Amino acid sequence: MMEQEWTRDYHAWAGTPPEVQPRFDLAVPRSACPQCSHPIAWYENIPVLSYVALGGKCSACKSPIGIRYPVVELVTALFFASAATHYGTSVTTVAWCTFSSLLIALFLIDLDTQLLPDDLNYLLLWLGISIALLGWSIPLASSLYGAIFGYLSLWSVTKLYYLISGKVGMGNGDFKLLAALGAWFGVEYLFALILLSSLVGSVIGGLLLVSGKLANKDIPIAFGPFLAGAGLVAMLVGPANLQQWAPFAFPLGAQLH
Ligand SMILES: [Zn+2]
């Protein structure tokens, strides 16, 4: 959908006639097997259960269904359960379920494409500020300062690095993502989130090195997955536990969640 939008934007900008694009959105076309185009019935589309029932194969052509589908579904369920454990039966739980869905999507999209789409980053940012405004999470000021300093901290480091080295170390998407995380956790958590993203980066980088997928150490890796991973780890651990277990990561003091 976003690629179609980029093509339309390009033609509008270049003043060239737009291409004819088939309708492609969340409703149309219906999900289909990428191998044989067999339309997927609703009962073949139930998270995890359908994958198990179908034995991991398309019901029509028997080609294998990617393991990524049930894994993403299971991981999402784990985060939903974690939100329910931390916040019980409340609207805050629903908010954090949305948070984890968006971050899992951002994590995987950035790993695949090195892009953090604005559509998801801004949605995450505005939702974080909105739920603070509604009184469902942290004080509004903490959320707003989190967004502002989340953006500015990475932006200024990247500008400085560019002045010194002439290389662009991080993209705009990374600034927006840390701004969004700041809006959800509050300004007090920014330092802890940056520390956590370095930790997540070391683990992912180490795994890539060990698995041989990172043969050339000079290949740039996107920072977005580490930031998204940090947000997910912080949510899983629970903001309150994070303060308790790693007080050194809270030089500004802490805001109770
Ligand atoms: Zn098929």
Image: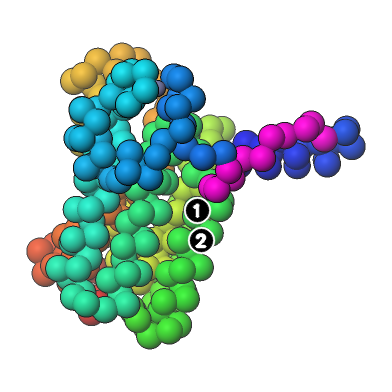
In front: 247, or 227?
227
Residue 93 occupies quadrant = bottom left
Q: Which residues are magenta?
A: 18-28
Residue 138 occupies quadrant = bottom left
What element does badge 1 sit on?
helix
Q: Is residue 125 above or below residue 19?
A: below
Label 2: which residue?
123
Which quadrant of the picture is home to ligand 1?
A: top left
The kind of residue tagged 2 is Leu
In front: 213, or 244?
213
* Residue ID at (49%, 44%): 116
Q: Is residue 157 above or below residue 204?
A: below
Q: Quadrant of the N terminus?
A: top right
Label 1 residue near ligand 1, CB within 8 Å: no
* Residue ID at (42%, 46%): 106
Q: Is residue 118 above or below residue 95?
A: above
On whether residue 21 falls in the magenta region, the answer is yes
* Residue ID at (43%, 69%): 128
Look at the numbered discs 1 and 2 and tell me whether their residues touch, using CB distance below 8 Å: yes
- The main secondary structure of the magenta stretch is loop
The picture places residue 117, in percent across and down from the top left corner, at 53, 46
Label 1: which residue?
120
Label 2 residue near ligand 1, CB within 8 Å: no
Q: Is 196 left, or right, of 223 in this rendering?
A: left
What element does badge 2 sit on?
helix
**CA distance separating discs 1 and 2:** 5 Å
The kind of residue tagged 1 is Leu
* Residue ID at (69%, 35%): 22
In front: 236, or 189?
236
The picture places residue 40, in percent across and down from the top left corner, at 41, 36
- Mark 1: few/some/many CA within 10 Å (<14, 14-19, 20+): some
